[in-house]
Image (cartoon, rainbow, N blue to C red):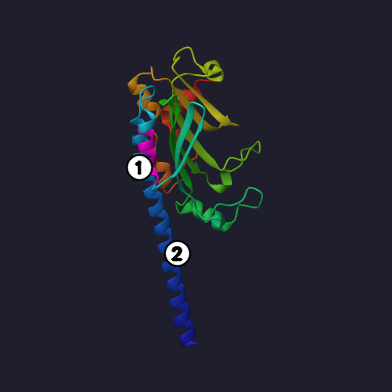
């Protein structure tokens, strides 16, 4: 009986040690993603729309190929170059929208500061010159907030900022008279934030519209709104309502 008690205590201590090590590893991975996100954003911001070239974008791809998923494609004179860095929890800790997801395991993830996140950045080039640059941050929501009252499935918050040499027809319809060089819209059902601005926008406003906050990746209390990712873009979005 005494030996069984001793072994059960040892097993419990080992289990707690392993769980603690797993938490520390996941937390460290989130901090690594945050560190990489800050540097990726700085790299994307160093490019100039209507000035940077294919050679510069190719060097960008090579710099990040060790740490990220890089994707490139060309169609005629238009080329796309994108980089994505992901931190994804194992499937069993991410849940399934088609199954019951309010399990204690998923809820525990929400309370100990562990979550999935993805950052990305990239360019569109036309005739060898960058005509668009973009950056995006996506962070998972607590499982209890995956569905809106209307039933739309939105497991993440995501903010995207784009500098574009020109607005398309849909963009032009979204322009607010008070600031013709920038726009904001949501992606679906009020979720997801996209801001877009032209190179002619002021330098200070460009910086504000790409001022991503990465604390949502690492903080203990989960973020619940794109306002926490891209504050200036969120304020711009409110003007359309």
Which SS class for mark 2?
helix
Asked if one can make out residue 7 in the rendered structure from this viewpoint, the answer is yes
Which x, y percent locates residue 192?
A: 53, 33
Task: Identify the residue shown where x is 33% and y is 22%.
Answer: 204
| Residue 63, numbered label | 1
Q: Residues within 10 Å of mark 1 (few under 14, many from 20)?
A: few
Say which of 56 and 222 sits in front.
56
- In the image, taking residue 210 as reference, residue 89 lies left or right, namely right
Which x, y percent locates residue 24?
A: 39, 58
Nearer the observer, disc 2 or disc 1? 1
Q: Is residue 177 magenta?
A: no
- In the image, taking residue 95 as reference, residue 3 lies left or right, namely left
Asked if one can make out residue 219 in the rendered structure from this viewpoint, the answer is no
Q: Which residues are magenta?
A: 56-65
Q: Main secondary structure of the magenta part?
A: helix
Say which of 165 and 117 sits in front.
165
Q: Which residue is mark 2?
A: 19
Q: Residues within 10 Å of mark 2 (few under 14, many from 20)?
A: few
Label 2, label 1: how far apart the Cα atoms are: 35 Å
Identify the image quadrant of the C terminus.
Answer: top right
């Amino acid at each position: 009986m005494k030996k069984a008690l001793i072994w059960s205590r040892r097993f419990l201590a080992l289990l707690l040690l392993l769980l603690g090590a797993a938490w520390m590893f996941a937390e460290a991975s989130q901090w690594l993603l945050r560190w990489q996100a800050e540097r990726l954003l700085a790299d994307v911001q160093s490019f100039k729309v209507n000035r940077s070239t294919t050679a510069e974008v190719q060097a960008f791809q090579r710099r990040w190929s060790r740490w990220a998923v890089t994707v490139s494609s060309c169609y005629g004179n238009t080329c796309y170059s994108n980089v994505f860095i992901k931190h994804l929890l194992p499937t069993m800790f991410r849940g399934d929208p088609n199954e019951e997801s309010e399990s204690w395991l998923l809820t525990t993830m929400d309370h100990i500061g562990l979550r999935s996140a993805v950052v990305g950045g990239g360019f569109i080039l036309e005739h060898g010159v960058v005509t668009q640059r973009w950056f995006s941050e996506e962070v998972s929501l607590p499982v209890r907030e995956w569905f809106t009252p209307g039933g739309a499935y939105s497991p993440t918050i995501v903010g995207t900022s784009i500098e574009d040499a020109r607005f398309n027809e849909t963009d032009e319809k979204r322009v607010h008279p008070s600031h013709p060089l920038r726009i904001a819209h949501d992606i679906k059902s009020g979720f997801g934030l996209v801001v877009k601005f032209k190179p002619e926008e002021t330098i200070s406003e460009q910086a504000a519209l790409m001022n991503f906050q990465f604390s949502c990746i690492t903080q203990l209390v989960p973020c619940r709104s794109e306002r926490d990712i891209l504050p200036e873009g969120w304020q711009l979005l409110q003007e359309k309502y």
